[in-house]
Amino acid sequence: MLSHRVLVASCLVVITLTAHAAQAQPAKPKDGPLGMKFVPLPKATFYMGWNGQKGSAKKTEIKEGFEIAIHTVTQG
C-alpha cells in the first residue's frame, strides 16, 4: 500500500510541475535497469489528498529530487 501511495504522490508531482512549467522542456527519458525508462523528478512542494472538501489537501514537500519510471510497474 505504501508503494501505491508513493506512486500516486509522484504522479501528482509530475502533473503539478508540468502544469506550472509552461516554458520548460520535457525531460528526456534515459534507459535504466531491465530496459526501463526513467525521467528526473526535481524536489518540489505540492498539495496531496484532496477529497472534494475545501482545506482537505495537505501541503507536501519532496526534499530531494529522484528519478521515476515513465510507465506504471505492476506485479502479476
Image: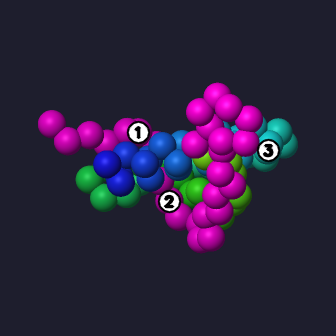
* Dot placed on the residue nearer the N-terminal end, 1 or 3: 3
Marks 1 and 3, Cα distance to the nearest angstrom? Answer: 21 Å
**Residue 21: numbered disc:** 3
Instruction: Identify the coloring.
Output: rainbow
The relative height of residue 30 versus residue 73 in the rendered view (above or below) is below
Could you tell me what secondary structure mostly forms the magenta stretch?
loop
Quadrant that contains the C terminus = top left
* Horizontal arrangement in the rendering, residue 76 relative to residue 16 (left or right): left
Q: Position of residue 58 (x, y in %)?
A: 65, 51
Where is residue 57, by image quadrant?
top right
Q: Which is nearer the eye, 3 or 52?
A: 52
The relative height of residue 1 versus residue 22 in the rendered view (above or below) is below
Q: Residue furthest top?
A: 52
Residue type (three-letter) at the residue carrying disc 2:
Glu
**Mark 3 neighbour density, 10 Å: few (under 14) some (14–19) many (20 or more):** few
**Residue 4: numbered disc:** none
* Horizontal arrangement in the rendering, residue 71 relative to residue 11 (left or right): left
Name the residue carrying label 1: 71
* Dot placed on the residue nearer the N-terminal end, 3 or 2: 3
Q: Position of residue 74 (x, y in %)?
A: 26, 40
Which element type, helix, strand or loop, lies under badge 3? loop
Residue at (66, 42) in percent of width and height: 56
Confirm or deny contact between disc 1 and disc 2 (CB under 8 A): no
Where is residue 25, by image quadrant?
top right
Q: Which is nearer the eye, 43 or 3?
A: 3
**Mark 2 neighbour density, 10 Å: few (under 14) some (14–19) many (20 or more):** some
**Residue 67: numbered disc:** 2
Q: Which residue lies furthest to the bottom in this view?
A: 64
The relative height of residue 20 versus residue 38 in the rendered view (above or below) is above
Give the magenta range.
49-76
| 74 drawn magenta | yes
